Amino acid sequence: MSDTHAQTVAFVRDTMLPEREPPILERGAVKWMRENLFNGIISTALTVLSVLVVAWGVAEIGPWLMRSIWDAESLSGCRQILDGASGACWAVIKDRWHQLMFGFYPPDLYWRPVLTLILLFVALGPILFPWVPRGMIRFSAIYPFLGYFLLWGGSVWFPVSVALGFVAGYAALVAFRSLGTLVSTIAAIIAPILWWLIAAGTLTAVLDSIVPLGLERVDSDEFGGFLISLVIGFTGIGLSLPMGILLALGRQSNMILIKSVCVTFIEFIRGVPLITLLFTAQLLLGYFLPPGTSFDLILRVVIMVTFFAAAYIAEVVRGGLAALPRGQYEAADALGLDYWRAQRLIIMPQALKISIPGIVNTFIGLFKDTTLVVFIGLLDPVGLSNAIRASSDWQGIYWELFIFIGAVFFIFCFGMSRYSMYLERRLQTDHR
Amino acid sequence: MAMDSGAPRESFRLSMLLYDTRYRSYTIQIFALMLLMLGAAWLIDNTIQNLAALGKDFSFRFLWSTAGFDISQRPIEYDSQMSHGRAAIVGLLNTIILAIMACALATVLGVLAGVLRLSNNWMVARLMTVYVEVFRNIPTLLWILVFGAIMTEAMPPPSAFRGDTPAASMLLFDSVALTNRGVYVPEPLFTRSLGSIDLGGVRPSLDAIAFVLVVALSIWANIRLIRHATAVQNATGVRPKTWWKSLLILFGPAIALLLALGFHLGYPELRGFNFGGGIHLRNSLIAMWLGLGIYTGAFIAEIVRAGILAISRGQTEAAFALGLQPGKTMRLVILPQALRVIIPPLISQYLNITKNTSLGLAVGYMDLRSTLGGITINQTGRELEGMMLMMLIYLAVSLTISGAMNIYNSRIKLKER
């Protein structure tokens, strides 16, 4: 026994062995690839397949992109430069850039839509980001009227007197407050309607004759390209959210008439394709209005697109309302808040937060659906791509236009979806 | 012992209609009803006046007048001498055919992409993310036009298939031809056909009816077999082997019927300047099918992914703790719960596909909107009636689908207290 003990003692180690590197297969890029690309037979097969797909795509499109032509007068000019090889002819974008952006908007007035777009971002700032000074919200409030004035031009007094209608509504709300919420709300709805129907037109005419101030008028049929997509898209987005919230509240109401009107509206709009609503705006509105009246096609489209998006937003917000625990409503009642205060202070902030992804998805859908106006003859980017292809210079050009239009839509829609993720993170209050 | 029963009963005052919450809602509703009726009366009055001014009446008689236009894709017999109503039905059938095809493609692509996006494989997951983001963020109309352009511009003309060394060749053992005039696929033919029956203008093939009946009966028999096996298992604890019986029941009768009818495929072949034989899928159909299917597939992928992620990891672990194998865990624990999350938005995507088929006009697909809502309206000048009828049909289709969804939803809903 002592022998064995003596032998073991001789091998007591007094220093640690130096650490060895992990085997080559278990470190660095090789390990990562083994875990993420070649983890089993199926995974390896999928990797090989995807590499093949990507390689095929690059081989097909790569050379075409590499031989891009930026300077040419026409497609035949492009083909002459390419000399038989196949290559992308981006010259069409350069040649028709202004048309794709502004349609047939008068070229010397291009600064107006550009300024409107820049001001749009200024106006969106305080709504979208918390670090923008709060006072800027006043600019956001007047922006719709400013934007209208800049884009369509005409007398400056028209948007001013329309805006005064909202002031009249607010004044009525304050003046009748002593008579209770119901009376003041009704007054706040009736006052602006009366203002617009009776006073606004005269006021515009009178002010215009005293101080003729204004910009050159641009008609709606001169609008086109991405200008039209953005105008319809952003107006629809701005108007459909409040309308959708009201519809959702109406659908939750226990007043049977209000509820059934809202349900009918929502289900009807959601049940028919947007394109039939647009055709209604184009063909049938003449039947429903008093004989001899007609109004701007873009405005009609905006109204229809707003109705369409509002019905979807109503359903999304209803989901958010349903997800709120009953206790929140009861707590608001227990605090003695009336219906609108409870909605504004307790219910909506929570319900809307839950519905953010759905609301932004609806907005993205609305923005993409602005392409459907091509069917009623408005020249949005898709409509312009058909018009450009019909011209003798660019006959037969497809992919470059599609890629360009698709890329612009992608940037806007992808941006919106990223913003909604940011907003969800910012508003996250639960502890995870 | 006369007890005071709370507050004294107030007599009714007129101001309570405004200030008392018990009566206020009635006031609001009566006012709203009056406004609503006024608005409706105004609209109807305007419409009557406008119709009178245009010298039109309101009638649907135009549906029985001669259409006078052709429809390229005819699921039922139709020619230009038939009525506008029949053209509308052909359009509706085309809409339904396209919707079913696109739903099937979107579901397959969506489930594949949704599952693969969650895969451990970095490359595949990234590729699927690119697919989802690119297709979701670009308008479907643009995709339809792109696929339409691919079909007409990038495919070889039928003449390229000619000669000893043709520039293009047919796919899948010379059975499918992709040309710039459409896709030609083999058609099923029967040497001992049962013929067809005439159901007042519609002539369905008896072979197809017999085949569908046999398959339906086989599926019903198979369900009975599985129920019986489960009953035996519940009674004795031993599940009888059923797989070979299932195979026999499911495929035996169908194969026997096909053999009896002399089933064979009719291949498309080049005749003159174009292909003949086989089924001709027109470019418009292919463009709409690919455009709608691949576009909506990206949305379904996100729905499937969200559904799988919604099931907490604890469910899998609990199933493993109970000793269930991975396959059974998926089938008995994960899928039933994930489906509950997935199905409602999935159905609403199907609704979207059905509504988006109305974009067929962009590539000249003759759907309901192009026939009833397009050419018929233009020819007869009946915008009001035509649009109303078309909206009602779309509404009926949508409400049917969403009604079915609601029934399904209430059946699978978690039964709580």
Image: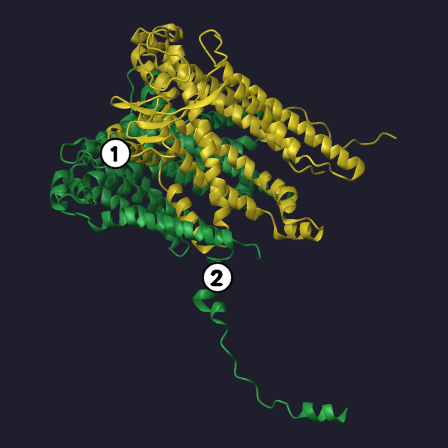
Q: Residue at x 57, y 47 (%)?
A: B310
Q: Residue at x 33, y 19 (%)?
A: B72
Q: Residues within 10 Å of mark 2 (few under 14, many from 20)?
A: some
* Up-down relation of residue A58 to residue B55 (above or below): below
Q: Amino acid at mark 2?
A: Arg
Residue A270 image offset from top left, x and y in percent = 46, 28
* Up-down relation of residue B313 to residue A363 (above or below): below
**Relative horizontal placement of residue B302, taking residue B173 as reference (left or right):** right
Element under disc 1: loop
- Residue B388 visible in the displayed image: no
For the N terminus of chain B, which image quadrant?
A: top right
* Along the viewing direction, whichever of A78 and A412 lies nearer the viewer: A78
Residue A54 image offset from top left, x and y in percent = 36, 50
Q: Color used for chain B? A: yellow
Q: Which residue in the structure is indicated by mark 1?
A: B166
- Residue B154 visible in the displayed image: yes
Q: Color used for chain A? A: green
**Relative horizontal placement of residue A89, taking residue B197 as reference (left or right):** left
What chain does badge 2 belong to? A
Q: Amino acid at mark 1?
A: Pro
Q: Which residue in the structure is indicated by mark 2?
A: A34
